Image (cartoon, grey):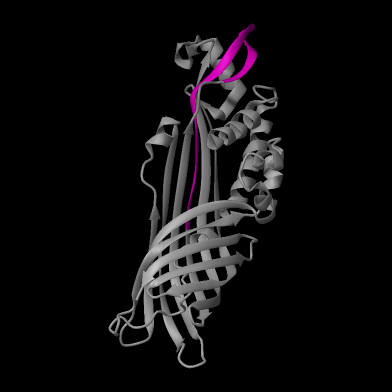
Amino acid sequence: MMLKRLAALLLIGLLFVGAAFADDIDEEVERIEGALDELGSGIVGSLSHYNTLGLGWSDAYIGQLFSAPPSFGIGVTVGAATIPLSVLTSPLEEFDIDSDEMLADLPASGAISRLGLPLPAYTVDARVGGFGIPFDVGFKLGTLPTLAMLEDEGVELDFLLVGGDFRYALLDGSGILPKLSVGLGYNHSRFGVGVTMDDMELADDEVGGEDVSLVLGDPKFDFGWRSNSVELKAQASKRLLIFQPFIGAGVAYNWASMGGSFSGELTMDGEAFDDLDDDDREELEDMLGEFLDNGEVALGFDVPDSGFTARAFGGLGLRIFVLNLDVGASIDTRGSVGLELNTRIQL
């Protein structure tokens, strides 16, 4: 499984190979934590774009609720926003991971090399027309149920993408004029993955003058983020028979955090840390320092991020009676590319 393989790379090959329990373990762990921080910064910077997935309807304004027929719609969006590979290459090299080799096992690795590593998402979208003044309001929600198949593999997933927007129509699309709206929206995403792996042998080393086997029992890798954004956007669209091209732009303020941790119970020659004699425990504590706490090895990172980003988006909608199919693409100022497909029933 790809998640387990990547976790193993980031933990076994990165954390302990070559440097495990060496004299400079503190320096090595600091180097690794710095690379993890850089990796987190590269990913967290793309989350503001990820948050905008969903509600990317081709209509810049859907009309009034109390009209004939009333204006509302509901549908599903699937899409992805990419993490530029340029922000991942440097920290992965610190872990002696070749990004091209890592991607070779993934489908569409050529496209990923060009566009970036995709973060997929889906949302259920709904939009309702306004009343009195020309506005509409949209809502979106995406989440994942617990998947027994993943639990059997020792993988836990948590996903939530939620948001909404308010759009005011400056032009309603009458005559030769397009529809033109300005809007304000809020988006939130949350993601977490936990991977529990088989017992992991760290190294054969000398403790208390004897060669011993040091093993981590039930090691677990946890990784996740929380991201929020408030976006001011403008969009224009024009119906041409059954087609509706659209373009738009947005500026967002984003605040997010991303973190990860690795932990496992340390044993020596099959004996739990608490069952070792005082001298062996003390020697192990000297080796691992602050990264060993009462027999548990733990390493983690937490990366905050905030700031402004801008994006441009556009696409084409197809409408046959009440059935709509939209294809959209976007790019933001951090180099993240977004693609999404929406299908909905809209009156």
In the image, residue 83 lies in the stretch drawn in magenta: no
Residue shown at 50%/23% (left/top)?
198
Residue that protrudes farthest toward the bottom in the picture: 175
Residue shown at 33%/83% (left/top)?
64
To which quarter of the image does residue 32 belong? top right
Residue shown at 59%/69% (left/top)?
310
Q: Quadrant of the C terminus?
A: bottom left
Asked whether the viewer can see residue 126, the reply is: no
To which quarter of the image does residue 2 belong? top right
Boundaries of the magenta span: 201-227
Of residues 49 and 284, the one nearer the viewer is 49
Of residues 297 and 245, the one nearer the viewer is 245
Is 62 rendered above or below residue 198?
Answer: below
In the image, residue 204 lies in the stretch drawn in magenta: yes
Is 266 rendered above or below residue 196?
Answer: above
Give the prevailing secondary structure in the magenta stretch: strand
Asked whether the viewer can see residue 148, the reply is: yes
Of residues 117 and 74, the one nearer the viewer is 74
To which quarter of the image does residue 152 belong? top left
Is 72 rendered above or below residue 277?
Answer: below
Q: Is residue 27 left or right of residue 282?
A: right
Q: Position of residue 33 (x, y in %)?
A: 62, 39
Q: Position of residue 187 (x, y in %)?
A: 44, 63
Residue that protrudes farthest toward the top in the picture: 210
Is 42 rendered above or below residue 75?
Answer: above
The total of numbered circles placed on residues is 0
Q: Position of residue 92 (x, y in %)?
A: 68, 41
Q: Position of residue 230 (x, y in %)?
A: 47, 68
